[in-house]
Amino acid sequence: MNSINPDDFKVIDKITLSKIPTELKVDADDDEKEEALDKVQIKLSKKQDAMYAHNKYSFLICLQGMDTSGKDSLIREVFKEFNPRGVVVHSFKTPNSTELEHDYLWRHYLALPEKGKFSVFNRTHYENVLVTRVHPEYIMYENLPGIEKVEDIKSDFWENRFEQINNFEKHIAQNGTIVLKFYFHMSREEQRKRLLNRLENAEDNWKFSAGDMKERERWDDYMMYYEEAINKTSNEKAPWFIIPADDKDMARYIVAKIIWEEMQKLTDIKEPELDPKVRANFSEFKKQLEKE
């Protein structure tokens, strides 16, 4: 497990999703994978406490993937050792009426992390160049100048959105937010198995949506648009990582290790030192408290 190198999953050149495996074969059983994740969780928690006190950096963790790719369970498992004050999860649904009165990035700006904290975007601003590419009719709800019908949405519209997203991420990165973007690369066959599991197991029935079946029919379109979005928006300040997602335990460990390695690069993070005058009076403070 220690041989996992986060750079192996980082997108630094143009990628073709169909050529990237959806499962990483390792010589470890499920217990060993969980134990490895537990160790990273503890280290992440301690480092995040120091980052919170340091109050200079923040992390934006972006999670994208097809339905059933394991985003929800990863959030639960990877961040469960964090102090609750240090991490906020945002699940972006269909824009509501208030959000549609603003540009498409507005609601994402509002959810950016405070200094010292993590924000996890479960589905992200990339929905605006993914779902809307598959269903361009959704753009009509944005009431944009010059867009009166779907046929008005030309290729330069999407190129502009990629540029806007790159600028958005560049802006927040230059102001102390570490941006890490994870695509959960799951096979179509694995999704089929997971959807069947939701149908066959009563305790998981609530997770099933007929909409998942509809979107599954557009699998090839989604793969094409994911590939394009990743290629156009992965850069050193806001890199994409392609995570083999057919094995959920392995995917969780890889994501946790990548975050840990990125945190290790922030060598100036340290807890603030206590005022020497305050420390010198510790014994007196202790006496006062003991007398109460």
Image: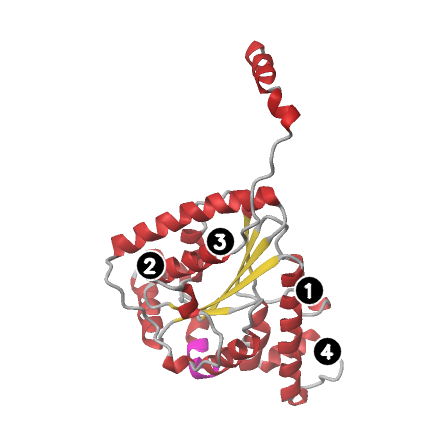
What range is drawn magenta here?
A: 214-221
The secondary structure type at the circle numbered 1 is helix
Looking at this view, is 218 or 33 the one in front?
33
For disc 4, the marked residue is 144
Which residue is found at the position 54% from the left and 76% from the top?
130
Q: Quadrant of the C terminus?
A: top right
Looking at this view, is 199 or 187 the one in front?
187
For disc 3, the marked residue is 264
For disc 2, the marked residue is 249
The secondary structure type at the circle numbered 4 is loop
Which numbered disc flags the more N-terminal residue, 1 or 4?
Answer: 1
Q: Quadrant of the N terminus?
A: bottom left
Mark 3 is surrounded, within 10 Å at the Cα level, by few (under 14), some (14 to 19) or many (20 or more) other residues, namely few
Which numbered disc flags the more N-terminal residue, 2 or 3?
Answer: 2
How far is disc 2 from disc 3 in space, using C-alphas? 23 Å
The quarter of the picture where residue 113 lies is bottom right
Residue 43 higher or lower than 112, as above or below: above
Residue 150 higher or lower than 63, as above or below: below
Q: Position of residue 212 (x, y in %)?
A: 43, 72
- Give the mark toward the camera: 1 or 4: 1
Q: Residue furthest toward the top?
A: 291
Answer yes or no: do the residues labelled 3 and 4 have beta carbons within 8 Å?
no
Q: Position of residue 70 (x, y in %)?
A: 40, 63
